[in-house]
Each structure stands twice: as structure tokens, then as C-alpha cells.
Amino acid sequence: MASRFLVLCVSSLFFFLLAVSSAPTSGYYKGDKVFDVRNYGARGDGKTDNAIAIAKAWNDACQWSGGSSTVYIPLGTFYLSQVTFTGPCKSYITFIITGTLTAPRDPDVIKQEAWIEFRYVDNLTVTGGGLLDGQGDYSWSLNDCNKNPKCRTLAINIGFAFVRSSRINGLNSINSKMGHFNLFAVEDFNITGVTITAPGDSPNTDGIKIGRSKDMHLYNVTIATGDDCIAILDGTTNLDISDVRYIN
Ligand SMILES: *[C@@H]1O[C@H](CO)[C@@H](O)[C@H](O)[C@H]1NC(C)=O
Ligand SMILES: *[C@@H]1O[C@H](CO)[C@@H](O)[C@H](O)[C@H]1NC(C)=O
Ligand SMILES: *[C@@H]1O[C@H](CO)[C@@H](O)[C@H](O)[C@H]1NC(C)=O
């Protein structure tokens, strides 16, 4: 993985930012129309597949024409087989994850590149400080990429493609099957307050992969994975990275 790309793992870079005032999480959706996934049948019981419920909440929020909207995932463990959130949306949209989203243990259930995908959205904020649990510990043993060049590709936890003027602010990701975050063809996109972890010996669990993207800021992120922390692929310009903590 590492050889073809510029790989960054900035260790122990601490910038103490003064006077940073971050809005309280609940403040993000004051005045927004809130689409609570529970009103679409989602259940945080760790068993129910919430893919359809969460996709419906997204569609209603995205098509809401009365102003900005918020999709709200409360505390609880929400099992999710796979989902794609597609835009364009009518206005600014916030996706708040306070609880945990849990991926299928069986990697064959996910038939797309990323377990959770956002595509063709502008003015999106993903926040809430919740957790994406990729359940990769159940499939890492299937990964033989170190000796098999035709090895199978397993899902990335979350992907953003053709997403502009957007940000991830407060999100945790653990035990992806392969990489954690994939950014492709995004523009004016910020990532902050993110913690990404997978065991040091987990195969190909890259942290943040960025390709064909421009005008990005990554700051205040903590990464500890089994492979590249931040991988920058071709066609990426104007990428600003600071305050990355690498733990092992
Ligand atoms: C996104 O924000 C930009 C800048 O404020 C605005 O011009 C554009 O219309 C917005 N798009 C949507 C879908 O809200
Ligand atoms: C990203 O961060 C930069 C620097 O803080 C800021 O100027 C820009 O408006 C931010 N963009 C988004 C989409 O949040
Ligand atoms: C950095 O992110 C963490 C969450 O990972 C947050 O608790 C903390 O307040 C952030 N620090 C700054 C200076 O924004």
C-alpha cells in the first residue's frame, strides 16, 4: 500500500490552540428541521438492520425545502448493513451521530466500496462525536493482501465522493475492515475532532485516504491503525494538515 503514495504519519505534533470555541453539539441543529431516525423505525438494539430507516430519514432531510435540516442518530447501538446517502440536497444538511453505528460482521453483506457512503452533497456537516464500528476483527483473517496480489477488497468504514463545502467535526471510527475514511473528489472539505483506531497488527486498516481532492484542512485528529495513517493519492491539491496525533 505505502509505496505508491505519499504517506504521512506525523507523530507527537501538539499545537495548543488558544481561544478555540467549538459550538456545543446540540447547538448545531437549533433552528434546523430535525429528522430523528427513530421516527423512521430505527432501533438502537444492536440487531435491527437500520439501513432503510436511516436512508429514509436522509432522503426526507435532504429534500426538505424549508431551510437547513438535521438527520439525528441518538444514543444506542444501531446496526447498519450498508447505506449510500446521495445528494444534491435542497439546503445545508447536518448528520449527527451520537450513538454507535455497527457494521455487519460478515464482509459479504457490504457490496459497495464503503460501508457508509456520501455522494454528491454540498454543505454537509457530519458531527455528534459518535462511533462507527467496522467490526473488522471478524474479517481481518480473510485479508491475505501481503501475499496475494488479487486479494479481495473489504469495505472502508465511511466514504465521501464528490462532496463539497463540507466538514466532519467530531466522529470516532474503530476496527474498519480495510481503510477507515475515504475521500474522493471532495472540495473545500475539513476533518477535525476525529479519532481513528484499529490494532497495530490489523491488515490494511488505513486511516484517512485522500484522492483527486482539493482545498482540504485536517486538524486535531488522532490516528492509530495497522497501516497508513494518512494516504495522499494522485490529483490532490491544497491540503493542509496540522495537529495530528499518532498513537501506537
Ligand atoms: C452551499 O453553500 C453555498 C455557499 O453558501 C451556496 O452558494 C450553495 O447554494 C449551497 N448549496 C446548497 C445545496 O445549500
Ligand atoms: C475549513 O477550514 C478553513 C480553515 O479553518 C476555513 O477557512 C473553511 O471555511 C473551512 N471549510 C469548511 C467547509 O468548513
Ligand atoms: C480535538 O478533538 C477532540 C475530540 O477528538 C475534542 O474533544 C477537542 O476539544 C478538540 N480540541 C480542539 C482544540 O478543538
Image (spheres, helix red, strand yellow):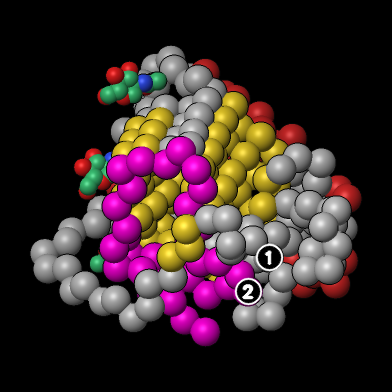
Q: Does residue 246 show up magenta in the picture?
A: yes
Magenta-drawn stretch, dominant element (helix, strand or loop)? strand
Left or right? Give the position of 1 relative to 229: right
Left or right? Give the position of 171 relative to 199: left
* Viewer-side residue, 58 vs 39: 58
Identify the residue under disc 1: 204
Residue 156 visible? yes
Left or right? Give the position of 52 relative to 23: right
Q: Secondary structure at mark 2?
A: loop
Residue 88: x and y in percent read 50, 20
Identify the residue under disc 2: 226
Q: Residue at x 52, y 25 (%)?
A: 120
Residue 211: x and y in percent read 51, 43
Does the residue at mark 1 contact the one at mark 2 (Cβ under 8 Å)?
yes
Instruction: Read off the magenta span.
Output: 219-248
State the residue lying farthest toward the left.
Answer: 19
Q: Residue at x 33, y 48 (%)?
A: 239
* Viewer-side residue, 55 vs 233: 233
Crowd class of label 1 (few under 14; some 14 to 19; many from 20; radius 10 Å):
many
> Ligand 1, what quadrant?
top left
Residue 177: x and y in percent read 73, 61
Q: Which quadrant holds residue 68? A: top left
Q: Does residue 19 show up magenta in the picture?
A: no
**Residue type highlighted by circle 2:** Gly
Q: Which quadrant holds residue 225? A: bottom right
